Image: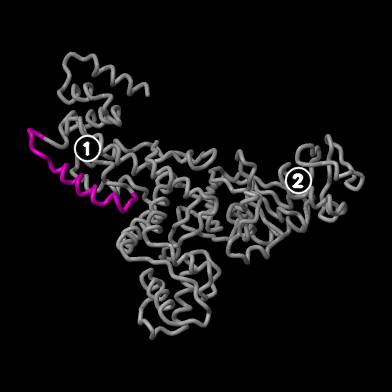
Amino acid sequence: MAVALYLFLLFLYSDSLHALEKGIRENWHKLSHPHKVYELYRLLGFKCVWFCQGAPTEHLRSFQEVLKEVVHHGLNPQDYLPREGLEPELAYTDALLKLSYDLYYGRLEPSKVYKNWNLPKKPDRVLQTLHALLREHRLTELLRELSPRSSDYWFLVEQAKTLRELSHVEWKPIRETRRDETGPCLQEVAYRLFLLGDLEEYRGADLSTWELQEALKRFQQRHGLPVSGQLDKKTLGELNVSPAQRLQQVYLNLEKHRWLSTEHKKAVVVNIPSFELFYLERGVPLLHSKVIVGRNYRTDFRPTPVLYSKIESISLNPKWYVPLSISTKDILPKVQKDPNYLKRRGFKVFYMGEEVDPLQVDWSSYSQKNFPFLLVQEAGQRNSLGRIKFNFPNPFAVYLHDTPDKHLFNHTKRAFSSGCIRVEKAKELALRLLGEGWDQKRLDNLIKTGQTQSIKLNEAVPVYLLYFTAFERDGRLHFREDLYGYDTILSRLVSSGGGR
């Protein structure tokens, strides 16, 4: 900031200003990125970029080619046309910078969508990249150089092209049909599955029941539905979502990719809407696990937060110090119905630091407003955290942990927790994080002792809790429900033009 101010004052008061410097000074308040415009021209030696001696340059044609492609990245080319009222040379540079920063950082501030957004920000390399592209006459490579480099992002860009073509196809709602019904309705379902790539070949009435069921299974898997092969109500609902709507969903997820900086040697990544966890080394997934995330119930909304932190330690046979919100919302009503509930589930009750007998407490006299107790569940088979807990500092008091309720992983939609993430393959994840010198036998022996202990990792491992509703799996495009309504918020902000 101090350097930019110094540069501004330098050219503002210089008696021998270059023509471009004077132009920037005179149009300072009209430019969207005045400091960036000045700095880019300084790097270029204050040479013209777009028009030299009145003639358009190669860069102008290259920029126009780039604008034709930005739509596949979910950006509107009209937003990056040179502004009226500015000298064309400066107007095009200002537009180039706007596009470049939107590509690199995203159009919107993520904190407008996610509470307490704390994910690390990418270092700014936009000006250096533009300098190199212009100097080396490679401006057509702008999208490749400044967009996210992840294969996931570029997969979505390619899928956007396909969906854009499909968005012109008429997509009338298909009505619900009986199981034994055949004819035009099922033929329309089959044709739709063919267009979406879940059915390899469409043969109208000649299509076998088995082929249709297999295509439906592929579609259901791609949309996070129970894989039955039957045309149930939820499957029909997803089939009725038009390619134009799916295209917008892809665009929103491209924007979310632009917010991320996830280049780490090791990382744990949870995608909340797909109920999945990945352990990665140098970007390669070495472990995949189902997870359970926070509830999205209308009357009991407890979302898992989007956040970044680092796993610092692992607790074996953890005790559970129950948060006040869970004590009052979940446990108190059960105790009021059954006074033996706490002892049966291995809870101890503390008041002002002293343990009290839960059977001597008049639980009916307490509520969320006056609950004075700390509930602690002892380690063991009944403990809600299971046998393993992964600890990382965060303002939401959430963590990853094991669970005794393994049957819940059989559900397709797994939004059952109070915000924490329950991990199906908790032991496998622990071994990955603990690294060299650890094996299944050593870990099991420590767990069998029943003693609560904490193991500090040799190196803290980054953990990302993310929210992607469109993504690649096994080379195919998957979609998931907007579990917490964040995509709806993001879409509204994008539509209103709310930027950074």
Give the labeled residue for mark 1.
82
Q: Is residue 228 left or right of residue 29?
A: right
Q: Main secondary structure of the magenta part?
A: helix
Question: x, y percentage for residue 245?
Answer: 40, 57
Q: Residue shown at 26%/44% (left/top)? A: 78
Instruction: State the SS at label 1.
Output: loop
Q: Is residue 113 left or right of residue 298?
A: left
Q: Residue shown at 60%/58% (left/top)? A: 291
Question: x, y percentage for residue 481?
Answer: 51, 58
Q: Residue shown at 79%/44% (left/top)? A: 375
Residue 448 included in the magenta stretch of the image? no
Placement of the N terminus among the 4 image quadrants: top left
Question: x, y percentage for residue 408?
Answer: 66, 63
Q: Is residue 300 visible?
A: yes
Instruction: State the SS at label 2.
Output: helix
Image position of 179 with respect to 119: above or below: below
Question: x, y percentage for residue 333?
Answer: 79, 50
Residue 180, labelled with which disc? none
Q: Amino acid at mark 1?
A: Pro
**Which of disc 1 and disc 2 is earlier in sequence?**
1
Kindly indicate the quadrant of the structure image that contains residue 202: bottom left
Q: Is residue 431 visible?
A: no
Front-most of residues 116 and 308: 116
Front-most of residues 367 and 119: 367
Residue 63 included in the magenta stretch of the image? yes
Q: Is residue 93 left or right of residue 372?
A: left
Bounds of the magenta span? 52-74
Most distant residue in the right direction? 360
Give the labeled residue for mark 2.
327
Q: Amino acid at mark 2?
A: Ser
